[in-house]
């Protein structure tokens, strides 16, 4: 697990920027504290910051050049089937000077080019330079577990694991206003855009080729293609067996490591399943949980301990106070290169920070909710699709719900908030309902947030175009909606825009690797080839996952409601952060000087925040704070 960076110059002026490669690599030092290296050619420079996981010797340091001197690779990730691929390459006459998966990947590319991507079982972003052709190849894994951003400038092309490394090449920092609108709706930026106009994400399942003819991006994997190639109409029990074997194998191969390894254990089904399976492949599995002393509503450590005791793991609980969380806030915010307002990132940051003191790699349960319909919104969507009587009842009660106190910080307040949002989306189109439930604003409210001079009609049109692209799985609104469309959209939007960046950034900020077995591509293709009825019905979610692993886990794990990974934002806004909000970040002075936001809208939002009925204003204000913190870092 590492950080990569590179620049390809188009002319003499572009070559002057090659000297910035050292600073670009240094910006990635937390991703790779064990070693740094740089490779240069006449018009190109590649950089690498290494976190040594497999073959920790110097033989595997990067940039890695083959024996001919023609091919050079910088690579971030893990290829879990590299030993199988290595043996196959040996049978074709290849020889190796290291025990790393890096060298295997490079030799496989030499033989097969872009076709090699289809053989890789793992997660990755990498770049390979062919000196004889003066051609640069970049690629990203199927689901975007590992990041890769790039920028095309007049004089050069550059790429990196993180935006901070690209900015060392002096790219103009112009705000992408359409992406900013999306940020405030979702609290993150999904798709191929970033907060900066000239910086883009290489999308999951894509590769790009840069040469004298230009830069061409191609897709090598899509969720649809994986589904279409599979067929599992063999009955529920047989599919349970298939799921067990696939996930068990995914966990087993992700136990490969030359450094200490453990597993996150939250007390939920997903991480508990991973822990149960991983315990079979090591003598004493290290497991780690995070608990909240001051927030018993969100503390799940008792359930995690049940699983840890069952499998006799070496279990560690990091029990945190609200003050512990607050003290890590600035460190977390400082690491973000673009606004990211999923507040649970703070918990992930602290979990990774503490776990890193004991191990270097951890398995996680990420991806399961998006695949098996594990979120509360999935139950709501199922109800909308299958229960017209419920819709009619909710419509009747909607005016009453709007008047009742709504808050994420109490069970009743959160239930009222969820029911209110359910009724609001009941009569929208399939795509618009999904978009409403995925975010925090309706379209009118979103436009009211900005000044008319900052957000133009062109920005709004671009925002809508980006939104429609993200919602492409819904197709024609006249078509019957399915849970499959919703889950695929979650993979495209929520997983790749929120969940995976959150874990990657917060783990890499602590020089720490996280591996999600559920996102093994064989598991994903299998699960999305299953019918909706195997995942959700009126009374249950994650049906096939629960049934498959019911004998491995304590009953208590299954018989409880799903809880979020929340932080006590409302309490902070009313105490520690109140002065920062009202006198600095969201003060009339700063808002009017920026000329980005409509102060009247901000003022109404703050009044709602400090009322007895805060609703979703907590998340909205948090997004504003995150943006303002980021804005001051880059522009003031």
Image (cartoon, rainbow, N blue to C red):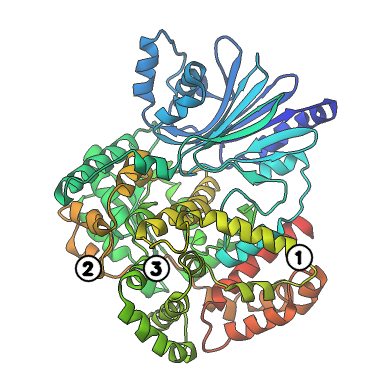
Distance CA(mark 1)–CA(mark 2)? 50 Å
Name the outermost residue toward the right: 13
Whether residue 298 is visible here, answered yes or no, is yes
Q: Which residue is mark 3?
A: 377
Query: What residue appears at the point 79 percent right and 60 percent down from the top-left corner?
Result: 636
Judged by depth in the image, the label closer to the viewer, 1 or 2, is 1
The first of marks 1 and 2 along the sequence is 1
Which quadrant of the figure has residue 608? bottom right
**Res 342 label:** none
The first of marks 3 and 1 along the sequence is 3
Asked which secondary structure carries label 2, the reply is loop
Relative to the observer, which residue lies in front, 148 or 232? 232
Residue 89 horizontal/vertical position (percent):
40, 15
Residue 34 horizontal/vertical position (percent):
55, 33
Relative to the observer, which residue lies in front, 122 or 566? 122
Query: What residue appears at the point 74 percent right and 76 percent down from the top-left corner?
Result: 598
Q: Are marks 3 and 1 in contact (CB under 8 Å)?
A: no
Distance CA(mark 3)–CA(mark 1)? 32 Å
Q: Which residue is mark 1?
A: 456
Q: Is residue 462 above or below residue 427?
A: above
Relative to the observer, which residue lies in front, 369 or 583? 369
Q: Are marks 1 and 2 in contact (CB under 8 Å)?
A: no
Within 10 angstroms of label 1, few (less than 14), some, or many (20 or more) residues?
A: some
Relative to the observer, which residue lies in front, 280 or 113? 113
Describe residue 428's horizontal placement relative to residue 306 as left or right. Answer: right
Residue 547 horizontal/vertical position (percent):
19, 56
Describe residue 484's horizontal placement relative to residue 455 as left or right. Answer: left
Distance CA(mark 3)–CA(mark 2)? 19 Å
Q: Which residue is mark 2?
A: 559
Residue 164 horizontal/vertical position (percent):
67, 45
């Amino acid at each position: 697990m590492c950080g990569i960076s590179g620049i390809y110059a188009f002319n003499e002026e572009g070559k002057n920027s090659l000297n910035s490669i050292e600073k670009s690599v240094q910006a990635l030092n937390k991703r790779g504290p064990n070693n740094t290296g740089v490779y240069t050619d006449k018009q190109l420079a590649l950089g690498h910051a290494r976190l040594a996981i497999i073959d920790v010797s110097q033989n595997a340091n990067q940039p890695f050049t083959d024996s001919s001197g023609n091919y050079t690779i910088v690579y971030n990730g893990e290829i879990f089937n590299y030993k199988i691929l290595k043996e196959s390459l040996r049978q074709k006459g290849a020889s190796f000077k290291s025990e790393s998966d890096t060298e295997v990947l490079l030799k496989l590319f030499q033989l097969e080019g872009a076709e090699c991507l289809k053989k890789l079982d793992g997660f990755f972003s990498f770049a390979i330079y062919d000196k004889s052709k003066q051609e640069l190849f970049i690629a990203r894994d199927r689901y975007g577990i590992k990041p890769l951003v790039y920028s095309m400038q007049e004089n050069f092309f550059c790429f990196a694991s993180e935006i901070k490394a690209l900015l060392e090449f002096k790219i103009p920092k112009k705000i992408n206003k359409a992406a900013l609108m999306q940020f405030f709706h979702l609290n993150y930026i999904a798709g191929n855009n970033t907060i900066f106009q000239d910086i883009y994400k290489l999308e999951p399942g894509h590769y790009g080729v840069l040469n004298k003819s230009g830069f061409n991006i191609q897709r090598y994997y899509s969720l649809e293609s994986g589904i279409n190639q599979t067929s599992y109409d063999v009955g529920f029990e047989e599919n349970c067996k298939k799921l067990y074997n696939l996930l068990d194998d995914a966990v087993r191969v992700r136990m490969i490591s030359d450094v200490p390894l453990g597993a996150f254990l939250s007390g939920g089904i997903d991480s508990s399943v991973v822990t149960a399976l991983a315990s079979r492949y090591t003598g004493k599995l290290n497991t780690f949980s995070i608990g909240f002393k001051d927030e018993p509503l969100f503390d799940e450590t008792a359930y995690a301990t049940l699983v840890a005791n069952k499998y006799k793991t070496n279990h560690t609980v990091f029990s945190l106070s609200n003050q512990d969380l607050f003290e890590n806030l600035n460190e977390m915010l400082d690491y973000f290169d673009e606004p990211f307002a999923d507040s649970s990132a703070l918990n992930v940051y602290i979990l990774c920070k503490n776990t890193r003191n004991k191990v270097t790699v951890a398995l996680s349960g990420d991806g399961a909710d998006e695949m098996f319909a594990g979120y509360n919104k999935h139950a709501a969507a199922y109800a909308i699709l299958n229960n017209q009587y419920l819709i009619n009842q909710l419509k009747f009660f909607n005016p009453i719900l709007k008047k009742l106190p709504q808050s994420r910080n109490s069970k009743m307040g959160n239930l009222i908030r969820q029911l209110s949002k359910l009724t609001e989306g009941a009569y929208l189109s399939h795509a618009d309902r999904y978009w409403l439930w995925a975010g925090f604003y309706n379209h009118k409210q979103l436009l009211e947030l900005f000044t008319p001079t900052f957000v133009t009609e062109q920005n709004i049109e671009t925002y809508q175009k980006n939104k429609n692209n993200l919602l492409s799985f819904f197709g024609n609104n006249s078509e019957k909606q399915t849970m499959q469309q919703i889950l695929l959209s979650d993979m495209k939007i929520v997983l790749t825009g929120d969940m995976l960046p959150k874990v990657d950034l917060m783990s890499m900020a602590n020089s720490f690797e996280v591996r999600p077995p559920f996102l093994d591509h064989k598991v994903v293709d299998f699960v999305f080839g299953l019918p909706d009825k195997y995942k959700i019905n009126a009374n249950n979610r994650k049906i096939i996952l629960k049934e498959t692993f019911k004998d491995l886990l304590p009953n208590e794990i299954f018989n409880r409601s799903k809880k979020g990974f929340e932080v006590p934002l409302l309490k902070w806004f009313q105490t520690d952060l109140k002065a920062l909000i009202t006198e600095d970040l969201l003060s009339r002075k700063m808002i009017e000087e920026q000329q980005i936001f409509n102060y009247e809208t901000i003022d109404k939002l703050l009044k709602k925040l400090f009322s007895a009925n805060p609703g979703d204003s907590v998340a909205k204000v948090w997004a504003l704070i995150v943006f303002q913190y980021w804005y001051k870092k880059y522009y003031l």
